[in-house]
Amino acid sequence: CVCVCSIIGAVRTSSYMVHILSLQGFRRSICDQSFYYGPVSKFWAYAFVLSKAPELGDTAFVVLRKQKLLFLHWYHHITVLLYSWYSYKDMVAGGGWFMTMNFTVHALMYSYYSARAAGLKVPRPLAVIITSAQIGQMAMGLLVSALVYKWMNSADCPTRIDNIGCAAVMYGSYLMLFSNFFYNTYLRRCQDAHLKKE
């Protein structure tokens, strides 16, 4: 269900993002609030915020299966839930980018998980691509947050300084944690395998 919701959400929010980018430009796409009240996008903004609760349920599956629960996993799911709900309440600038990126990355990630849960053999490079996309999402999240801060005194870029601070801490910590995960999971294993061959 989360996979299907993420795919549809990615299609709907990204098509709206492309519409704003093509008609009004990059700055407007950052400061735009219409994601929260547009005819179609308001549903997907609300669905995005609500989707954070079942995504947190991933943690329960990890615990129930007695798998190793990574700090990155539960920290990411709890903090993104809290930040999403907090930001939706104030309809802050940057939300359209945050929703679109998250839906898109989750469409890839949950498709991968669904395929694996169905017993399909998924090529390992796909996992590398998904983690790379997550790292890219976090870097873009920091950039969007910095631009919202830069433009926050403009009447058309509504936000609050505490929200920008939370976004910067959240995306900065995610960037470090996902980069560390990438290094330990993909690069270090390759190095260790190479050393064993020698």
Image: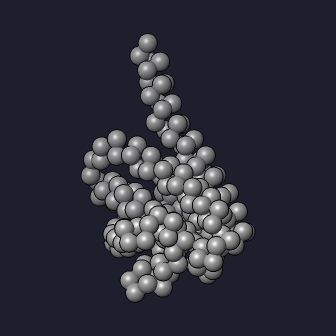
Whole-percent x, y for residue 22 in the image: 36, 68
Provide residue 152's location: percent of width, then percent of height. 66, 69
Image: 35 above or below 171 = below
Which quadrant of the rendered structure holds the N terminus?
bottom left
In the rendered view of the protein, which quadrant contains the C terminus? top left
**Residue at the image point whose x is 62% and y is 69% from the top:** 83
Q: Residue at x 40, y 87 (%)?
A: 39
Q: Nearer the viewer, residue 62 or 174?
A: 174
Position of 122 relative to 57 (above/below)? above
166 in relation to 183, above or below: below
Is residue 169 toward the left or the right of residue 72 in the image?
right
Q: Nearer the viewer, residue 65 or 38?
A: 38
Q: Vertically, is 118 above or below 127?
A: below
Colour mode of the rendering = one colour
- Name the foreground residue: 80 vs 195: 80
Q: List x then y, in percent, for residue 26.
A: 47, 64
Q: Is residue 126 left or right of residue 73?
A: left
Query: In the figure, residue 47 lies in which quadrant?
Result: bottom left
Q: How many marks?
A: 0
Q: Residue at x 30, y 43 (%)?
A: 123
Judge whether residue 75 can be spotted in this image: no
Camera-nearest residue between 155 and 165: 155
Q: Is residue 169 visible?
A: yes
Residue at the left extreme, as displayed: 120
Q: Residue furthest right?
A: 162
Is 123 situated left or right of 99 in this image? left
Residue displayed at 51% across by 66% down: 27
- Residue 120 percent coordinates (x, y): 26, 52
